[in-house]
Amino acid sequence: MSNARLPSFRFLIGFEAAARLGNYSRAAEELCISQSAVSHQIAQLEQQLGQPLFRRKGRGVELTVAGRLLLDSVGKSLDQIRHGLSRIETYMDDSLVTIVCPAPVASGWLQPRLDGLLQRHPQLCPIVSTDETARYIDELDVDIAITREPLRQTDVLQVPLLADELVAVRAPGPHTGAGLLCLEEDLTSDRTGPFIRQHLGRLRKTAIYDDARLLLDAALRGRGCAVVSRLLADEALGTGRLQLVEGIPPFALGRLWMSRIEGEPRMALVREVFDYLVEQAVPLAKA
C-alpha cells in the first residue's frame, strides 16, 4: 500500500480499541464516541483494505487472520506513539530529573542523600533508575548518569565522582555470626576472588548472593562478615549499624563517573542536582 492510500489514523485507533476490547460498544465508550461511529470506521477500513477484519462472536467480535496481522503492526505503532508522548510529557515537566545509577550506589550512597536534595529543592521529583544499559544522555530519557566507566559520548560533561572499594563489614555486637557472606561474582572473579580467599578464606561460607542489596541486608541482620562495596554500605557504616572488620584491608574497585549534557541542560534544576551530588561526593572522591 502506498503512502497515499494509508488508512485514516482515526480508523486505526477505532480498530485497535475494538480488537483489544473485543467489543464495539466498549471501544466506543473508551473513545467517547458512539457505537455506530466505531462500526462505520471499521467498515470504512475494511472497504479500503479489501479484507474483513472482524467476525461476530456472541455479543462481541473476534479478529480474522487479516485483523490479527493488522493489529500486530497497529498495536506496536500506537505503543511507540504513546511512549513518545510520555517522553515529551516528562521532558516538559520541570520537576522531574532522571538519574541513572548502579543499584548498589543508588541504594547505599544516593538514596540517603536525596533527603538533603529534596530539602534544598522541595519541588524536585527525582526519577531514579538502576538500568545500567540506559547510559546515553539525551535530555529525554536520562538527565544524569552515574557509571563505572566514562561514557563514550560527545557533548557531555563528565566528572570523576566517587571512589569505591570492597570492604569487610559486620554488625556490631557479640551476636554477629562468624561466617562469610559474599557475592558469587566477587568470589569467582579472577580480580576479587584471590583477595577474598587470602583475607577471609578461613571463614566458613554462610551465604552467597547474586544481589548486593541482599548481601547488605544479611550483614545488617548479623549473619556474618560480608564483603561489600563501601558505597553500598555507606549509610550503614555512617550510622554505626555496620562496622569495618579490623585487619582486613580494602580492595580498590576504581572510580565512578557522573555525566550530564555539556553546557546548559534543559532546565536549571538538572544542573543544580548535578552540582549537589558533586558536592556530596567530595569527601569520598578524595578517599
Image (tube, grey):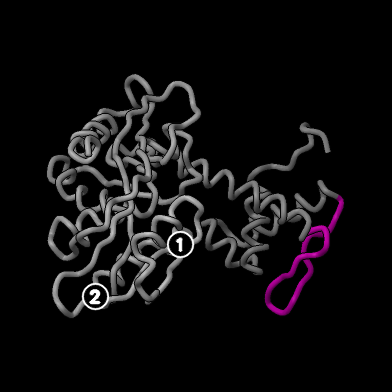
Q: Are marks 1 and 2 in contact (CB under 8 Å)?
A: no
Q: Which residue is mark 2?
A: 222
Camera-near label (1 vs 2) is 1
Q: Looking at the picture, which amino acid does disc 1 mark?
A: Leu
The segment highlighted magenta reads 50-67
Q: Please check the rendered image and state whether residue 182 is part of the magenta-colored stretch, yes or no.
A: no
- Work out whether residue 38 or residue 91 is closer to the camera in this orientation and state it: 91
Residue 265, given in percent of the width and then of the height, sits at 34, 26
Q: Quadrant of residue 269?
A: top left
Could you say where residue 27 lies in the image, as x and y percent from the top left? Answer: 59, 62
**Residue type at mark 2?**
Gly
Residue at the spot 45% in from the left edge and 62% down from the top edge: 187
* 32 to the left or right of 239: right
Q: Position of residue 5 (x, y in %)?
A: 79, 36
Answer with mark 1 or mark 2, whichever residue precedes in sequence.
Answer: 1
Residue under numbered circle 1:
187
